[in-house]
Image (cartoon, rainbow, N blue to C red):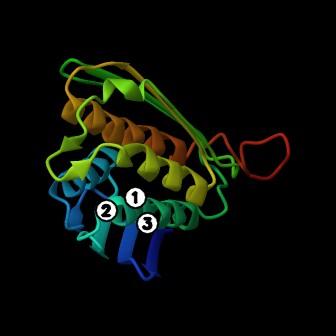
Amino acid sequence: MSRMAEIKRETGETRIALSLSLDGSGKAQLSTGIGFFDHMMDAFARHGLFDVTLSVQGDLEVDGHHSVEDTGIVLGEAIRQAIGDKKGIRRYGYFILPMDEALVLCAVDLCGRPYFVMDGEEKIAAPMVGGFDTELVREFFYSVSYAAGMNLHFKILSGANSHHIIEAMFKAFAKALDMATGYDTRIEDVLSTKGCL
């Protein structure tokens, strides 16, 4: 069974269309209007082996906030929808990813309860990377976690270059999510003492 989702969201600030395949090969077609954000979403797709098509038309004449935050909402909704009933999946995923001097830990629990923690964000010292406001890293992942209904934790263990740290976060999230959404043949229903997720 193909685990895919297509989500569209239109507001007075953004128009977003996203398709996601959890069982892809890392292909991405991206147009967000923010070059560095395209680069990060490409890293997410490639390193998680997800197929992603994303088109974002946002009010970039204001700034990138609405485009990035709303993309997080749409991606979270797509993850939740594509996962389906969660039967047989590992539920938990984690990864520690190095990128030059940067080292980032990411952990995911697809429990249905949203919670977001980002520790060490003061290490992202540059206010901008290209045309991307680095404050939006928190906004993006917060939106993903709440729309997907997942626990999402980041710990930035080390790093000096803001580009490296942020890219390590996107890649670590992709690897952790790939692990959490993967199947384990020993899990016959859902991985929960409650019997539901």
Q: Secondary structure at mark 2?
A: strand
Q: Quadrant of residue 103?
A: top left
Q: Are marks 1 and 3 in contact (CB under 8 Å)?
A: no
Q: Amino acid at mark 1?
A: Asp
The single residue placed furthest to the front in the displayed view is 62
Q: Secondary structure at mark 3?
A: helix
Query: Residue 91: x and y, percent?
Result: 61, 43
Q: Nearer the viewer, mark 1 or mark 3?
A: 3
* Residue at 45% across, 79% down: 9
* Residue at 52% across, 36% down: 93
As drawn, 22 above or below 127:
below
Which numbered disc flags the more N-terminal residue, 1 or 2?
A: 1
Query: Residue 122: x and y, percent?
Result: 38, 26
Please name whichever residue, 56 or 175, is drawn nearer the observer in this view of the structure.
56
Q: Quadrant of residue 194?
A: top right
Q: Mark 3 — residue?
A: 70
Q: Where residue 189 is drawn, which disc sits there?
A: none
Q: Mark 1 — residue?
A: 23
Q: Amino acid at mark 2?
A: Asp
* Residue at 33% across, 24% down: 123
Q: Is residue 21 visible?
A: no
Q: Label 1 neighbourhood size at 10 Å, few (<14), some (14-19), many (20+)? A: some
Query: Horizontal placement of 70 versus 91: left or right?
Result: left
Q: Mark 2 — residue?
A: 51
Query: Horizontal placement of 85 versus 125: left or right?
Result: right
Please name whichever residue, 82 or 157, is drawn nearer the observer in this view of the structure.
157
Which numbered disc flags the more N-terminal residue, 1 or 3?
A: 1
Q: Label 3 neighbourhood size at 10 Å, few (<14), some (14-19), many (20+)? A: many
Q: Secondary structure at mark 1?
A: loop
